[in-house]
Amino acid sequence: MQADLHLNEGQRWQLDESTRLQFEKIRSLLKAKPEENLAAYQEQAHQMWTAVQAMIQGCSMQGEAHNQLHHVLTELIPAIQTMQKSASLTEAQSVRSKIAAILGDVDRYFQ
């Protein structure tokens, strides 16, 4: 978790509908375990990247909720890019686990 990420006076931040849908797509991808080969993990990362791009294009969030979302994206985007470029299956699996942890932060801090 990013040190700067925090709740909104004890409550989770509100996501806009587009952002919520794209996070749901990424969660669905994480639930569907890829075949145990590097190409399958890289393809899954590509699909996650497509969801992130749609999230960025469709985001209508503003203010502090938007700022808090950026704390998540500054971890999520590099992790997905690393998974796409992983040189080994072990690396891709490790980064995929990190992505799952980042989405755990989304669940804890956003609704």
Image: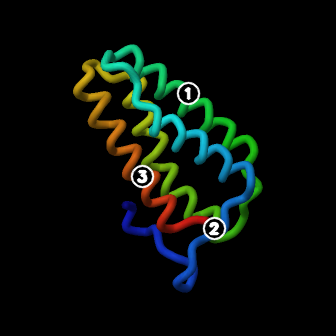
Mark 2 nearby-residue class (10 Å; few <14, some 14–19, many ≥20): some
Residue 39, relative to residue 109: is it above or below? Answer: above
Q: Where is residue 41 drawn, in percent x and y? A: 39, 23
**Please, what is the three-letter code of the amino acid marked with disc 2?**
Ala
**Please, what is the three-letter code of the amino acid marked with disc 3?**
Ile
In-image side of 23 versus 79 (left or right)? right
Q: How many marks?
A: 3
Q: Where the C terminus falls, by quadrant?
A: bottom right
Q: Where is residue 93 drawn, in percent x and y? A: 29, 31
- For marks 2 and 1 on the same chain, the one whose residue lies earlier in the sequence: 1
Q: Which residue is identified by label 1?
A: 47
Disc assigned to residue 102 = 3
Residue 89, relative to residue 13: is it above or below? Answer: above
Mark 1 nearby-residue class (10 Å; few <14, some 14–19, many ≥20): some
In-image side of 82 versus 110 (left or right)? left
Q: Nearer the viewer, residue 31 or 90?
A: 31
Q: Where is residue 46 drawn, in percent x and y? A: 52, 24
**Please, what is the three-letter code of the amino acid marked with disc 1?**
Gln
Badge 1 marks a residue whose secondary structure is helix
In-image side of 17 versus 37 (left or right)? right
Q: Where the N terminus falls, by quadrant?
A: bottom left
* Colouring of the image: rainbow
Q: Where is residue 32 drawn, in percent x and y? A: 46, 32
- For marks 2 and 3 on the same chain, the one whose residue lies earlier in the sequence: 2
Disc assigned to residue 65 = 2
Identify the residue at image location x=57%, y=73%.
Answer: 12
Give the image quarter of residue 39: top left
Identify the residue at image location x=31%, y=20%.
Answer: 36
Identify the residue at image location x=26%, y=29%.
Answer: 91
* Alpha carbons under labels 2 and 3: distance apart: 17 Å
* Alpha carbons under labels 2 and 1: distance apart: 25 Å
